[in-house]
Amino acid sequence: MAEQQFVYVIYIESTPETVWQALTDDAFTRRYWAGRRIESEWIKGADVRLYAEDTNDIELHGKLLEYDAPRRLSYTWHCADQPTDVESTVTFELHPMGDSVRLTITHEPLPVQDTARQGWPAILSSLKSYLETGTPLSATEMWRRKVS
């Protein structure tokens, strides 16, 4: 079903290697994804986890399906607050375009009403801003958790 597939393309003034590192390195993700960190062993079948800011609370988890650095990354995606049978796949494709990178994300299935449809453009725009200017988007800061 076409409405279950989400595809977003963004162009980033960077190298494929740097964009790849930003997608797979926990220190990088913390900078542009409101403090969240991604962790994995990055070998096929390994767990992939996204932790909430400065906690060990897992917000998202999945299994690594493909790791072809710095071209293609794919893993299953399951939100911790959803029923166990709700799972999708996220795939990133990186293509060099001169001094830029065309980054395409495909997330499927992803229902039309899912908030990730608004989240992905903001997260990837924050990534773009961070890599090009050194500053992430302030819009994504609203997702920071208030940890007491």
Image: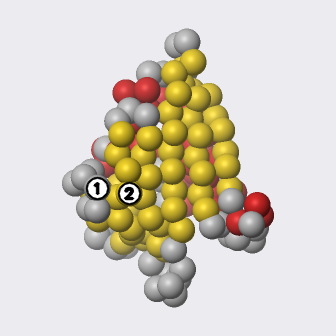
* Residues marked 2 and 1 touching at CB (< 8 Å): yes
* Residue count near mark 2 (Cα–Cα under 10 Å), binned few <14, some 14–19, many ≥20: some
**What residue type is disc 2 on?**
Leu
- Locate residue 88, reporting x and y percent: 54, 68
Residue 103, compared with residue 12, is above or below; it is below
Quarter of the picture containing the C terminus is bottom left
| Other residues around mark 1 within 10 Å, as few (<14) / some (14–19) / many (≥20) | few
Quarter of the image with the N terminus is: bottom right
Question: What residue is rendered at 42% in x and 58% in y?
Answer: 75
Q: Secondary structure at mark 1?
A: loop
Q: Which mark is residue 44?
A: 1
> Number of marks in the image?
2
Residue 148 visible to the viewer: yes
Asked whether the viewer can see residue 53, the reply is: no
Q: Residue 118: which quarter of the image?
A: bottom right
In the rendered image, the residue lying farthest to the front is 1
SS at mark 2? strand
116 relative to 87, above or below? above
Q: Measuring 34% from the left and 73% from the top, which residue is drawn there?
A: 57
Above or below for 102 versus 24: above
Residue 28 image offset from top left, x and y in percent: 36, 41
Residue on which disc 2 sits: 65
Of labels 2 and 1, earlier in sequence is: 1
Q: Amino acid at mark 1?
A: Lys
Toward the top, the furthest residue is 98
User: Observer-nearest residue: 128 or 10?
Assistant: 10
Distance of mark 2 from mark 1, alpha carbons?
A: 6 Å
Question: Residue at horizontal 37%, vertical 27%?
Answer: 17
Q: Position of residue 104 (x, y in %)?
A: 59, 40
* Position of residue 69 measured from the top left corner of the image (x, y, whole percent): 35, 36
